[in-house]
Image (tube, helix red, strand yellow):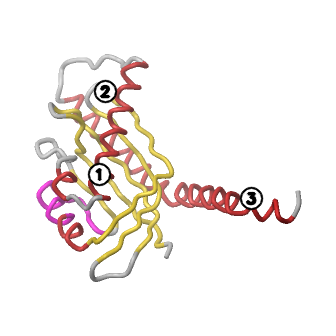
């Protein structure tokens, strides 16, 4: 390989190295968050299952695929609302009736629905522009009407009264299928590192 060929390949190699470095960094930093989220998810599942006498049938492969596709599509709607700075569309992604809690370290800690919505509304009013770059999203169907999504990547925000910020994030959502589609009932977001 000549020097020119190597130089031409450098941006691709650097991008791959950056993505792999981010994945390793996030995996190391999120282990406690993942464990706490898994524990809270298990506790919630126990709570939900103890409130019902009916047995939940195992999901078929086709059902799992459908749930994964539906939740990913709704996640795209969620990200689009933030990107367009559309507060009303963002709110519509959350369940008012079944909302459990929101943890968004270091900003929000354990808010109920009304407090969460009020808190985030302030962020929407201060944001000029937003961009999400997802490095990974995984959806795990739990039942016909419950699923967990985990995603990580970078957020870029341009603020009215603050400097531009690019941040590595990890987020986990608990989704519930309601009459009008999949809604977020629990959110756990962590911002790790400002990159710029």
> Over which residues does the magenta segment extend?
107-120
Q: Residue at x 21, y 34 (%)?
A: 181
Q: Earlier in the sequence, mark 3 or mark 2?
A: 3
Q: Give SS at disc 1.
A: strand
Residue 38 in the magenta stretch? The answer is no
Q: Where is residue 180 shown, x and y percent of the image?
A: 16, 34
Q: Quadrant of residue 190?
A: bottom left
Compared across the picture, whether 48 is left or right of 149 comes to left
Q: Residues within 10 Å of mark 3 (few under 14, many from 20)?
A: few
Q: Which residue is mark 2?
A: 143
Place residue 44 in its image quadrant. top left
Image point 32% across, 82% down: which residue? 162
The alpha-carbon separation of the residues under discs 2 and 1 comes to 18 Å
Q: Residues within 10 Å of mark 1 (few under 14, many from 20)?
A: many
Is tag 2's residue or tag 1's residue first in the polypeptide sequence? 2
Mark drawn on residue 187: 1
Q: Tell me if mark 2 has few (under 14), some (14-19) or many (20+) residues whose alpha carbon lies within 10 angstroms of its own.
A: some
Q: Position of residue 186 (x, y in %)?
A: 26, 48
Q: CA distance from mark 3 to mark 2?
A: 45 Å
Q: Which residue is mark 3?
A: 9
């Amino acid at each position: 390989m000549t020097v020119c060929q190597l130089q031409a390949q450098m941006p691709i190699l650097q991008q791959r190295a950056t993505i792999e470095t981010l994945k390793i960094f996030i995996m190391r930093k999120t282990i406690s968050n993942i464990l706490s989220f898994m524990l809270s998810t298990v506790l919630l599942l126990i709570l939900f299952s103890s409130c019902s006498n009916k047995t939940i049938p195992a999901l078929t492969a086709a059902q799992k695929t459908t749930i994964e596709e539906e939740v990913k599509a709704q996640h795209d709607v969620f990200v689009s609302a933030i990107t367009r700075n559309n507060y009303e569309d963002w709110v519509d992604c959350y369940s008012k009736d079944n909302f459990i809690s929101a943890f968004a370290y270091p900003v929000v800690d354990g808010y109920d629905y009304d407090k969460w919505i009020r808190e985030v509304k302030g962020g929407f009013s201060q944001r000029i522009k937003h961009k999400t770059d997802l490095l990974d999203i995984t959806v795990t169907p739990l039942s016909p009407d419950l699923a967990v999504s985990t995603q990580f990547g970078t957020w870029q925000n341009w603020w009215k009264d603050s400097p531009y910020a690019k941040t590595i994030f990890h987020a986990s959502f608990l989704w519930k299928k309601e009459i009008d589609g999949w809604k977020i009932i629990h959110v756990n977001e962590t911002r790790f590192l400002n990159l710029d």
